[in-house]
Image (spheres, rainbow, N blue to C red):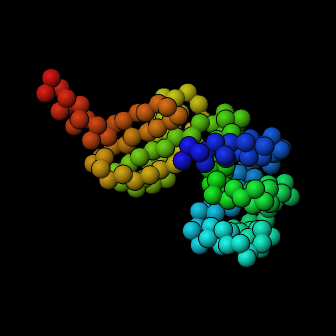
Amino acid sequence: MAELATIARPYADALFKAAPDADQAAWVGQVEALAAVARDPQLRSLADNPVVTKEQVFEVLTGAAKVALAPAVANFLRTVLDNGRLAALPLMAEQFQTLVHARQGVAEAIVYSAFPIDAAQLADIRGSLEKRFGGKLQLSVQVDPTLIGGVRVVVGDEVLDTSVKARLERMKTALLA
């Protein structure tokens, strides 16, 4: 994992430097669509097939992504394919999105919840978290039934754990101390 992240970083940096401010949001969507397709094991095996050309892989990848690519994003994808770095494309997309959010002053937050969260609840959580962390947040929600109830929020290297599981662990520690 660390090796792929190291490979992905210069590509994400180069794409970030090439992205005009006005086009960044569109480019994030395009690169994420490509990364979603690149995660498919069948596509990866197709790309590793020596009989298949890089142009054929490019056509299959862009066709499956179903998004119109900006010329610079298409060139970026060709460079990734020419250098045999398709496996790192999902991490490139993730790092590129992180760079764009940092430029926009938006922090990424992962909200772990025991149950699915609807839009109204997510808006309430967003408001509370933005006050707590002092800035705009881009939230993603992941369901984790082991939490029993409540939420666990990870923003960068900070963790806010209000889950029932965490409360039970604190009670257990206090009782055993």
Image location (x, y in percent) of residue 40: 58, 67
Q: Nearer the viewer, residue 174 or 93?
A: 93
Image location (x, y in percent) of residue 66: 71, 70
The reply to whether residue 120 is visible in this rendering is: no
Relative to 138, residue 63 above or below = below
The residue positioned 30% from the left and 50% from the top of the image is 146
| Relative side of 65 to 4, left or right | right
Q: Nearer the viewer, residue 41 or 3?
A: 3
The residue positioned 71% from the left and 72% from the top of the image is 50
The reply to whether residue 1 is visible in this rendering is: yes
Image location (x, y in percent) of residue 61: 71, 69
Q: Quadrant of residue 105?
A: top right
The residue positioned 37% from the left and 42% from the top of the image is 151
Quadrant, the C terminus:
top left
Q: Residue furthest front?
A: 50
| Relative side of 146 to 136, left or right | left
| Relative side of 146 to 59, left or right | left
